[in-house]
Structures are given as C-alpha cells and as structure tokens.
Image (tube, helix red, strand yellow):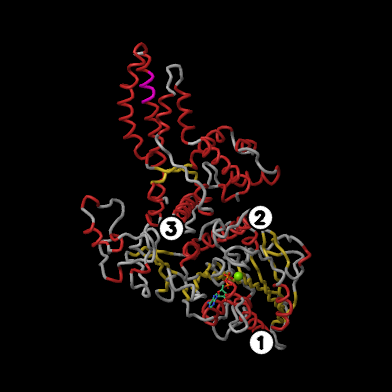
Amino acid sequence: EAKLRGAGRCRLSKIGASRRPPPARVRVAVRLRPFVDRTAGTSDPPCVRGIDSCSLEIANWRNHQETLKYQFDAFYGERSTQQDIYTGSVQPILRHLLEGQNASVLAYGPTGAGKTHTMLGSPEQPGVIPRALMDLLQLTREEGTEGRPWALSVTMSYLEIYQEKVLDLLDPASGDLVIREDCRGNILIPGLTQKPITSFADFERHFLPASRNRTVGATRLNQRSSRSHAVLLVKVDQRERLAPFRQREGKLYLIDLAGSEDNRRTGNRGLRLKESGAINTSLFVLGKVVDALNQGLPRVPYRDSKLTRLLQDSLGGSAHSILIANIAPERRFYLDTVSALNFAARSKEVINRPFTNESLQSPVLAPVKLSQKELLGPPEAKRARGPEEEEIGSPEPMAAPASASQKLSPLQKLSSMDPAMLERLLSLDRLLASQGSLGAPLLSTPKRERMVLMKTVEERDLEIERLKMKQKELEAKVLAQKAEDSKEKENHYPTMLRPLSHRTVTVAKPLKRAVVMPLQLIQAQAASPNVEIHILKNKGRKRKLESLDASEPEEKAEDCWELQISPELLAHGRKKILDLLNEGSARDLRSLQRIGPKKAQLIVGWRELHGPFSQVEDLERVEGITGKLMESFLKACGAVWRIWSSPLLP
Ligand code: ADP
Ligand code: MG
C-alpha cells in the first residue's frame, strides 16, 4: 500500500500526498494540575478529580447530590509528569510531519491552570515545545542524512494573535500580517519570518528573545496573564534527492492559547474587556471548529476567526491535532473549570452521587450558611422536614444512600449560594441556550437542565405579562364602574377599592416578595457589593389607584404602571444597555433581546464606523435593524428586567 507506517519511528511515504486519508478528528486530553499553593488550599478542597485514564468527575453546582462525569481521549491527573503528556499525546503525532501531513498541539484553559507549564515548562521540567523540537530535529537529522531519499530542512516561525491581529514575534516591527490560502488549500502568511534551525540551540536563540516580545497584560487574576494566542510554527520541508524530485511540507503548530477565563471575574474593563471579547471570539470559534470536525458537520467555520483561519490546514483534514485542556483543582477555578471541560468534552454524564471529598470529613468545612436540615443527608432532611414542607422540583435521588461520607458536599445549595455566582451560572446557561440554535453542543450542558432553567425564566416573564394584563383588566372594570356610578363617586371609592385590593393581593403576591433589577445591574453589583438594591414595593399600586381620575384614559394608566416599577432603575437599565451597545463584544450583544449573531455583528460594525451610540434609539440607524425590530427591542428593554425570588438575594 501507499503508506509504510509502523516499523521505526517514522517511515516516509513512497507516494506523495496524492491520496487523502480520511479526516482526522481533534483529540482532546485534559490535564489537571496539582494545587500550586498548598497553604492557601487548606480550606479549599478540590472540586474535580480523576476517575481513570480517560475520565474525571466534578461536583455539580446545580445539584449537590450529583456529580458530572466527563470522558476524554486522555486524562492526566495531578501526578502526571511532563513526560507522560508528551509521550502519551504529542510524540505519536510527530511522525506524520515527515509524511507531509500537518499537526497541531493546543493548550487550552483558564489563566493559571497550567497551559504555559504544559507547552513550555521550565528548565527542570521541560514541556511539550522543547521536547517536540528536540525529537523533531533528531528525527529530521536521521531521516535526512546523505544517502537517504529525501533531504530535510526545518524552519521556525513564531507569531502571536492579539485582538485578532497576527503579529510576527521574530520581527515585531512588521505589524498585522494577512493570512492567505494558496490554490492547493495551504494556508500561508506572506512576510512571516522563517528561521532555519538545525539544532536545539538554534531554536532557543530565536525563540527566547521572541518570547519576551509577547504582549502580556496584568489582570487581577494573574499578574502575567497572557491575553494573546502564542503560535509556534515548525515547518519540515522535504525534497526528494532523485527524480521525480518531489517536495513535501509538514507543519507543526504548538499553541499556548489565551486564557479561557470569563473576563467579568478578572475585573477587566475598557480595553481589557474588548481584548477579552476578541480572545473569547477566537476561542469560541475554535470550539465551534473542533465541534464541527468531531461531529463531521459539513461546514467548518474556519474563517470566523484569525486563529482558526490560520489553523485551517492543520485542524481536521489530514492533520493530526490534540487539544490539551488544562484545569486547576482549586474551587475558585470552579466555573472556569466547568466551562473548560464543557469546551473540551465529547461526552458528559450526570451521576447520582454527591461529590464527596475524602479530605472533607467534618461539617466544619461545610458552607457556613447550611442549615441544620441541609447538613443532614437527604433522607434525614426529609424526616426533619414536615411532610407538608416537601419540596417540589428538587428531585431526591432514589439510589443515594445516606452514608456519613455523603452527607456533605463542598458545593453550596442554590439558596445559600452567592447571588453573583448564581447569576453567572444562570447567564452561562442562558448563553448556552441562545447558542443552542447554532447547533453547538460545544458547551454540552445537558439539554434537559438548560431547558428547565430557560423555562423558569420564561414562566416568570409570562407571569409578569399575565399580571399586567390582569391589572389592565381590573382597571378597565374600575373605569367602567366609575362611569356608571359617577354620581356616587366619592362614596363608592372605598367599596370599589376593597375587591380590587383584595384581588390585587393574590395577583401581586409574587411581586411583593420580588426584587427587580436589570441583569447587568446584578453583575455590576457582583463587582461592587455596595450598589443599591431596588426593592419593588406594592405602594406603587396605591399611587396608581389614586391617580385613577375619571378623566384619565386607560392608556395613561398603563404608562403609570411602567413608571412605578422604578423610573431611575429603568433609566439605569437603559444606560446599561447603551453601555453594552457601545462596549460589548458581538457575543455580549447577543445577550440582548432579539439580537442574534448577525445583528450583533452589524452593531459592532456600525460602531467601528460611526463611533459610539448616544442613545439606545440610535440602534435604528444600524442597517438591518428595522423600525419594527427597534420597537420590539425597546419594549424588550424590559426583558433585561428579571424577577428573582428574594431568597437568592442578600
Ligand atoms: P497558564 O499558562 O495556564 O496561565 P501556568 O502554566 O503559568 O498557567 O501555571 C500557573 C502556575 O502553576 C505556574 O506557577 C506553574 O508553574 C504551575 N503549574 C502549572 N501546571 C503545573 C503542574 N502540572 N505541576 C506543577 N506546577 C504546575
Ligand atoms: Mg501562560
């Protein structure tokens, strides 16, 4: 056959790349690093642990009686060495380079989870890059010696993708470079520096000073957190020494991706926020590309970001790729770990058992807010409660026995959870749901859970609508009654009020205990806890009734209702939306009602062309935003208002 593989580390193909092998999927490995600061970690039990060489489990924030089990091509636990990762997942793909195929190794994960350690490592613990370079240079020396059929040469390039710009780290003055595709589908960057290397010393001579050219910004999460994708390209060129003098080229990309963390937690603002947006766009598209490849979807959205465009001929096709998702065991990484795992996961299953921690034996470490009932296992808790108190909607796992070790979970129940945290989780879910239509099991949250959450939100929206309708109805009745009994107006008012107020109590009951605030405000509040919380009181209703003069038309009364919700809050909401319009990334914009990916792009494009919006209504000037859409959007500004039941709030 055409290929002579197997014997030896590498055998060259006798026939060129005339026949394409079947598309290769992107393999995914997860590496859990050890605790890096044990002293800080004493009250910080791990929230994730390995099960076997391919799977791990993590506590489920939604239900502390469940854990989530993820399956990967490989899982490397906290005791794994640099050598384990290299020989297990990287070395096997290198031989394909000499077959004229491309390969890529990408380190993914939040800042501080070990991407650079995995890729670069330290002199004592060298990572993937030095190991791969050593081996590849050795391999090419062996295969390219005189007398062998092919002459081999190796070159390196080193670039950075920062804010969707391609920068040559070996020639920092060169500015943004363009990515092109030749007629054979090869991706190339005209003008990118290529240095020939024949030894590891050569490599270091170019690589080390260039590394210092990398753009790093200080964020609250990590002083030297990298906000850009560092891309090392190693090219192996082969020329046949005898006729027909064929040529072959194999490219290896070794990529230390930008941190995948959520920028809201790093305290990023302004430029940093914009940066993070761009980074997340690239990572987001990378996720979609990996997903499309691994599912065999007909369209792979390579062109949607610089990173994936660059990798177009090195991800999928005949290329051999491995994504190493780096995660950290500390609980403060929990959310980023979940999102990294969802990014990388091929499959996930929910297991009905609490995530107990071996090192967690006494209730001392349980969240302080847990009540006596919550401290008990589920069956005890059930007994402790009266039967009439039994919760609906929180399924008790039938099979969960209440052994001592299962009483506690390091995760808090929803009701005792930090509202800011809860809000982030919920908006993550909303985001997932909104991306569901793009066919992205990319973040493969089980649909069922997502649907339940979305349904709750929807039901609340509907409830508000229903209440408003009812209110209108009642007002109409009052007006009608008033017109009838206009003569006895003064006397009848109190009697008119009685049934109305009686009815209102039932109608307004959920509102009475509700706290209304814009979503953005909740986030802002997470950042600065002293932001005032506006509580909706039912005094608004009284005012409304007082204003119900016989002369006042019904429509005006409806306006009144809107205003009574809280005018300053409404203004605040509008301001937040305006800020979002002006500062949000395309992805952020999609959190707005009726703004999909296309419209979000249009908005961003308009903004870049015309500068900031001065008011929400300016949105109408964006091409593609119709008056009708605008109208419903403005109405939907109310959609950033959500009603949360009070136990969630401090
Ligand atoms: P990232 O590049 O993802 O921001 P780093 O690679 O800089 O993360 O890792 C953060 C810290 O954790 C560094 O001090 C690093 O040395 C350490 N670290 C990461 N992974 C490991 C590991 N597997 N073993 C030991 N230390 C690690
Ligand atoms: Mg790093």
Report the image quarter containing ligand 2: bottom right
Amino acid on which the number 2 mark rests in the picture: Leu
Answer whether labels 2 and 1 touch (C-beta < 8 Å).
no
Q: How far across and how far down the image is residue 191, in percent? A: 77, 65
Q: What element carries label 2?
A: helix
Structural crowding at the residue carrying mark 2, measured as other residues with C-alpha within 10 Å and reported as few (<14), some (14–19) or many (≥20)? few
Amino acid on which the number 1 mark rests in the picture: Glu
Range of magenta residues: 474-479
Q: What element carries label 3?
A: loop
**Viewer-closest of 488 and 344:** 488
- Residue 352 versus residue 485 in the image, above or below: below
Q: Which residue is drawn at 35% across and 20% down?
A: 493
Determine if residue 499 is in view: yes
Q: Name the residue under label 1.
A: 142
Comparing labels 3 and 2, the label whose residue is closer to the camera: 2
Q: How far across and how far down the image is residue 306, in percent? A: 65, 59
**CA separation, marks 3 and 2?**
31 Å
Q: What mark, if any, has residue 271 been given in the picture?
A: 2
**Viewer-closest of 165 and 224:** 224
Amino acid on which the number 3 mark rests in the picture: Thr
Quadrant of res 418: bottom left
**CA separation, marks 3 and 1?**
48 Å
449 is within the stretch colored magenta: no
The reply, left or right, for residue 238 in relation to residue 45 is: right
The mark nearer the N terminus, 3 or 1, is 1
**Viewer-closest of 203 and 476:** 476
Q: How far across and how far down the image is residue 400, in percent? A: 27, 65
